[in-house]
Image (spheres, rainbow, N blue to C red):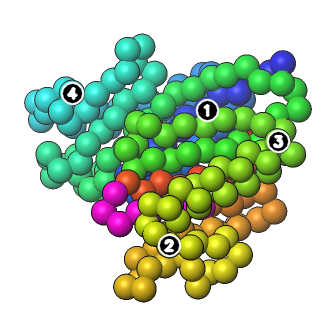
Amino acid sequence: MKTLHYVLVGRHLTGDSEIQFFHTRKEAVRFFKAQTSPLLEICYTNKLEEDEVYSFNEDKSAVRFDSGYDDELDSLLGECNHYFYLGATNVEDDVTHYVADFSEWVDESTVEFFNEQQAKEAWNERVDREIQNASEYEGADINREDESTWETEDGMTLFQETHHSDMYSDAYFGAAEDLTWTFRVGQIIFN
């Protein structure tokens, strides 16, 4: 067994979300604080409302920031909601990859860890399942192998899959005016 230390950064623009991995908890905490402290300082200085503009989970290992309440905060957030989660998990020694589900509802973003083969299987299962769900919801026939089926007739993107390398890919799902999300598979690379 080994312990993975990471910070999940969920952004409302789901394709911009990321996960940073660290060798030690101290490094992960340092990164988490470097990202969240300037944002919290603005919240405290400008007397912004907790649970409206920013909120913590119970043990303060996660904080969410909502844009649209303060110009100074929005300038750092890029006018986009953010969620920072400081995580640590014990995994098997053969774990080398992750599959993340980045939600537009940023604090619902999740990550799971796998060996390479399991990651490929989990990735394909999730993407195929969501294509089926999106096809049914939209009344469209989205085909993963046929890019011409990835958009509606009026140009709205329903699905897009991008392979950045052999084991680093994104799959974006958009559903009309509803929630959008991005799945990502990648290799665990430490900072």
How crowded pointer 1 is (Cα within 10 Å; few <14, some 14-19, many 20+) is rated as many
Q: Which amino acid does label 2 sit on?
A: Ala
Q: How far apart are marks 3 and 2 (CA)?
A: 30 Å
Residue underneath mark 1: 6
Residue underneath mark 2: 140
What residue appears at the point 44 percent right and 37 percent down from the top-left corner?
Answer: 108
Please tell me whether mark 1 or mark 3 is closer to you in this view.
Answer: 3
Residue underneath mark 4: 51
- Asked whether residue 175 appears in the rendered view, the answer is yes
| Dominant secondary structure (helix, strand or loop) of the stretch shown in magenta | loop
- Left or right position of 171 against 39: right
Could you tell me residue 40's position as x and y percent? 28, 32
Tell me whether circle 1 and circle 3 mark residues in contact (CB < 8 Å): no
How crowded pointer 2 is (Cα within 10 Å; few <14, some 14-19, many 20+) is rated as some
Residue 97 location, quadrant: top right
Please tell me whether mark 1 or mark 4 is closer to you in this view.
Answer: 4
Residue underneath mark 3: 118
Please tell me whether mark 2 or mark 1 is closer to you in this view.
Answer: 2
Numbered range of the magenta stretch: 171-178
Residue 22 drawn in magenta: no
N-term-proximal mark, 4 vs 2? 4
Residue 7 location, quadrant: top right
- Asked whether residue 41 appears in the rendered view, the answer is no
Judging from the image, what secondary structure is the residue with disc 2 in?
loop
What residue appears at the point 58 percent right and 85 percent down from the top-left corner?
Answer: 148
